[in-house]
């Protein structure tokens, strides 16, 4: 006979594995949530989001994270340092939210560096536009200095306005921040760090510059009688910015410019970063690829300042994470 009790017993072996599977899945979800909270939580709950404020001099958002050590040092009467990490979304887009999200996640990844260094971390959320694609704001290219588009005009000065607004905010919280910042970047953000340091040496105390697009701005006006306009060099820097190059302030800044020996990332090959004529001039004077130009750049810098260290790491390509520890160590020293 086939009774109802038999039916219930026949179904029991099916329900138990199902319940066990559900409990296992719930457990995995819980572990993932806790893990994500541990990784992201400290940044999520401490980061401050500042929206664009044209009246204060900046047309983009930025994010500010105060490390526990910086907060403690500031409240004990010490002066803290702001570490600027320029944003680099890696894409053209007029979607402001895309660049905001990328900047937020950049800060989320770098907040441990801020903790290690005991600094305040500032990440701008500059737009790299799709419509005016030639304006490479994230690399602080020539167009970023010449554009009349209000929201993108002089993002270097906009960054200074962000820094000063952050300093005022911190001071209101009892934390005094140095007017001079540390700045770190790799690839396009390395180009930004390199160029910002040259444009505003009075506002930088240390710079770690990784793989700056195949050619760091040479701090000279010419080479072998050939002019080097920005960003090849500084021949027309005063004409572009209205301010002469401050070689004394620049020569006092400890900098590390570094690259992997297998890195062939070359911004000179792209029209959104360089005018073709100027890129061709750099190629003809110094070599057709980043590795060929490396020693030329090193020699030009050595003729201007002894405070810049060039490092080429063997066996590494365009890989930021493999070189990041070295860059952080330099800034810490």
Image: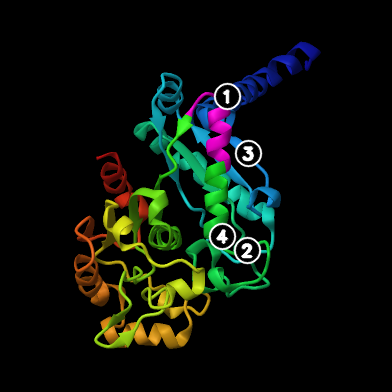
Q: Quadrant of residue 173?
A: top right
Q: How far across and how far down the image is residue 263, in percent?
A: 31, 67
Local SS, label 2: loop
Task: Determine contact: label 2, label 4, CB under 8 Å.
Answer: yes
The residue beneath circle 1 is 30
Residue sitting nearer the eye, 38 or 136: 136
The numbered disc on residue 155 is 4
* Front position among marks 3 and 2: 2
Q: Is residue 246 left or right of residue 277?
A: left
Q: How far across and how far down the image is residue 62, in percent?
A: 59, 46
The residue beneath circle 2 is 152
Q: Compared to 25, does 304 lie above or below? A: below
The residue beneath circle 3 is 49
* Front position among marks 3 and 4: 4
The first of marks 4 and 1 along the sequence is 1
Using a 10 Å C-alpha cutoff, classify the residue at mark 1 as few (fewer than 14 neighbours), some (14 to 19) or many (20 or more). few
Residue sitting nearer the eye, 4 or 301: 301
- Highlighted range, magenta: 165-175
The first of marks 2 and 1 along the sequence is 1
The numbered disc on residue 272 is none
Using a 10 Å C-alpha cutoff, classify the residue at mark 3 as few (fewer than 14 neighbours), some (14 to 19) or many (20 or more). some
In space, the residues marked 2 and 1 are separated at their CA atoms by 43 Å
Q: How far across and how far down the image is residue 272, in percent?
A: 53, 75
The first of marks 3 and 2 along the sequence is 3
* Front position among marks 2 and 1: 2
């Amino acid at each position: 006979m086939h009774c109802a009790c038999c039916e219930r017993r026949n179904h029991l072996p099916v329900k138990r594995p199902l319940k066990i599977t559900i409990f296992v899945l719930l457990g995995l979800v819980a572990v993932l949530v806790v893990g994500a909270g541990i990784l992201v939580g400290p940044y999520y709950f401490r980061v401050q989001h500042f929206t664009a404020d044209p009246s204060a001099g900046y047309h983009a958002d930025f994010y500010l994270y105060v490390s526990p050590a910086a907060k403690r040092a500031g409240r004990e009467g010490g002066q803290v340092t702001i570490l600027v990490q320029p944003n680099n979304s890696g894409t053209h887009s007029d979607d402001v939210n895309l660049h905001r999200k990328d900047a937020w996640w950049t800060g989320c990844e770098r907040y441990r560096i801020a903790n290690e260094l005991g600094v305040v971390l500032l990440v701008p959320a500059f737009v790299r536009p799709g419509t005016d694609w030639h304006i490479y704001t994230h690399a602080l290219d020539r167009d970023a200095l010449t554009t009349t588009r209000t929201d993108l005009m002089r993002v270097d000065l906009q960054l200074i306005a962000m820094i000063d607004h952050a300093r005022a905010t911190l001071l209101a919280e009892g934390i005094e921040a140095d007017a001079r910042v540390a700045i770190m970047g790799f690839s396009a953000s390395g180009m930004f760090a390199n160029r910002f340091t040259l444009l505003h040496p009075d506002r930088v105390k240390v710079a770690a510059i990784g793989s700056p697009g195949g050619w760091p701005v040479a701090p000279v006006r010419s080479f072998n009688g050939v002019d080097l306009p920005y960003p090849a060099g500084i021949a027309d820097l005063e004409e572009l910015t209205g301010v002469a190059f401050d070689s004394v302030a620049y020569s006092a800044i400890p900098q590390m410019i570094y690259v992997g020996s297998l890195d062939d990332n070359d911004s000179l090959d792209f029209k959104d970063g360089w005018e073709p004529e100027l890129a061709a001039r750099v190629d003809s004077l110094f070599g057709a690829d980043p590795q060929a130009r490396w020693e030329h750049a090193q020699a030009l810098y050595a003729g201007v300042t002894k405070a810049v260290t060039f490092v080429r790491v063997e066996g590494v390509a365009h890989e930021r994470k493999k070189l990041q520890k070295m860059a952080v160590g330099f800034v810490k020293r």
